[in-house]
Amino acid sequence: MEFVMKQALGGATKDMGKMLGGDEEKDPDAAKKEEERQEALRQAEEERKAKYAKMEAEREAVRQGIRDKYGIKKKEEREAEAQAALEANSEGSLTRPKKAIPPGCGDAAEEEDESILDTVIKYLPGPLQDIFKK
């Protein structure tokens, strides 16, 4: 039976005891090894972050050179200027700035409705025109 189990598991005799409910082998230095592994992972992560921060700084220097050469502003600068312009327009106001009313909206729409009614009345026969005009 043991031979069949060994063949079924692919020769994994060391793990076979664990799978059959045997005692696990405990490493006396497991905690120390785990702590060293975690420290190595933290150190590798810090090195990776430093490497990418350096690369990004180099890229930003190249970008800034291109911006200076062609007179392009950064997005943050453009957004800041737009925000400052918006705030300058509404400095004395206690409320948000009013939006411009597009032409054809508001009071002009009511006048337009009346002119449509007048147009329809013109096409009605005489007696019906008299009824609607009253």
Image (spheres, rainbow, N blue to C red):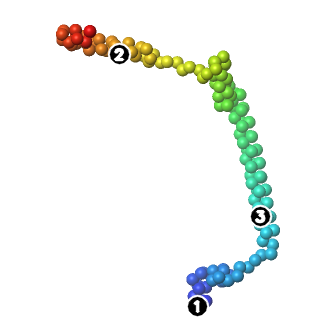
Query: Alpha-carbon neighbours of circle 2 within 10 Å: few (<14), some, or many (≥20)?
Result: few
Residue drawn at 80 percent across, 64 percent down: 36
User: Which residue is the site of mark 3?
Assistant: 37
Residue under label 1: 1
Is label 1 in a helix, a strand or a loop?
loop
Inter-mark Cα distance, 3 to 2: 80 Å
Q: Earlier in the sequence, mark 1 or mark 3?
A: 1
Q: Residue at x 22, y 8 (%)?
A: 130
Q: Amino acid at mark 2?
A: Asp
The first of marks 1 and 2 along the sequence is 1
Mark 1 and 3 residues: CB-CB less than 8 Å, in contact? no
Question: Circle 2 — which element?
Answer: helix
- Compared with 8, 38 (above or below) is above
Say which of marks 1 and 2 sits in front: 2
State how far apart marks 1 and 3 are (Cα): 40 Å
The spot of residue 118 in percent (x, y) is: 29, 11
Label 1 sits on what residue type? Answer: Met
Estimate the x, y position of residue 129 in percent, counting from the top left.
22, 10
Q: Secondary structure beneath disc 3? A: helix
Q: Is residue 70 visible?
A: no
Tell me the CA gap for discs 1 and 2: 97 Å
Q: Is residue 50 left or right of residue 13?
A: right
Question: Which of the two residues, 14 or 106, is positioned nearer the viewer here?
Answer: 106
Place of residue 115 in the rendered image (x, y in percent of width and height, measured from the top left): 33, 12
